Image: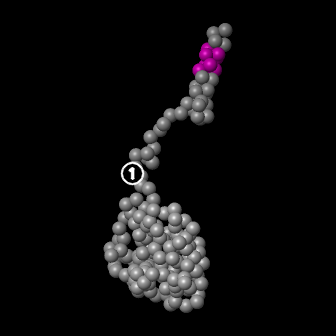
Amino acid sequence: MKLFQQLVVVFFVVFVLFGGLMMFSMDIIKIDWVTMMEIQPSFDAQEDPLPVPARSIPVEGPVSIPNMGAPVNPVPADDVSIQRAANLYTINCAMCHGTTGEGNGQIAALLANRPTNLTLDVTQNKSDGALFLTLTNGVPGRMPPMIENLTVRDRWDMVNYIRTLEPSQ
């Protein structure tokens, strides 16, 4: 009889331990374990990005090195470039600048700062490099940077397309 009682006690202890283990594994009782991910610093996307290493060229080429001045347009303003940019303009720019580039897009009236009229002399007299840098970096408070939306080639095509815009009569 004593052996039977000992066996019952052992089975009871094993059952309680197994039941407790199952409660932890089924997330009934949750323990917040400290992991390495919790104690390391975290950053949002593009928050304090590291500077470009010395003597290196970014993937997009030397046009994206900061403080190098306005680059020179390497893309000829041919029909292929203009057609590519016309499609990109319709997707990325026409909603604000309008189909004719006069700053009268569908959402222009809803913006605090009216989009720039791309057909005016003040825009058309800028160098290709200045327009490229404006597309790349945007205008704080007015226009978002297009560096994530458009590749380097797309932005040069867009510069060529902006040159073709004329004010409507």
Which SS type dominates the magenta stretch? Answer: helix
Q: State the count of labels.
A: 1
Q: In this view, does 109 lie to the left or right of 38?
A: right
Q: Is residue 149 left or right of residue 12?
A: left
Task: Please say whether residue 75 is visible from this viewpoint.
Answer: yes
Q: Which quadrant holds residue 122?
A: bottom left
> Which residue is disc 1 drawn over?
41
Where residue 34 sits in the image (x, y, percent)? 44, 40
Q: Which quadrant holds residue 61?
A: bottom left
Task: Please say whether residue 145 is visible from this viewpoint.
Answer: no
Colour mapping:
one colour
> Which residue sits furthest top?
1
Where residue 135 sits in the image (x, y, percent)? 45, 75
What's drawn in magenta, residue-wise?
A: 6-13
Q: Is residue 137 left or right of residue 162?
A: left
- The amino acid pointed to by label 1 is Pro
Residue plotted at (40% across, 46% down):
39
User: Could you say whether the residue bearing mark 1 is in a helix, strand or loop?
Assistant: loop
Residue 9 highlighted magenta (yes or no): yes
Residue plotted at (52% across, 89% down):
77
Nearer to us in this view, 130 or 52: 130
> Which residue sits furthest front?
169
Residue plotted at (42% across, 75% down):
134
Residue plotted at (48% across, 36% down):
32
Where residue 167 sits in the image (x, y, percent)? 51, 83
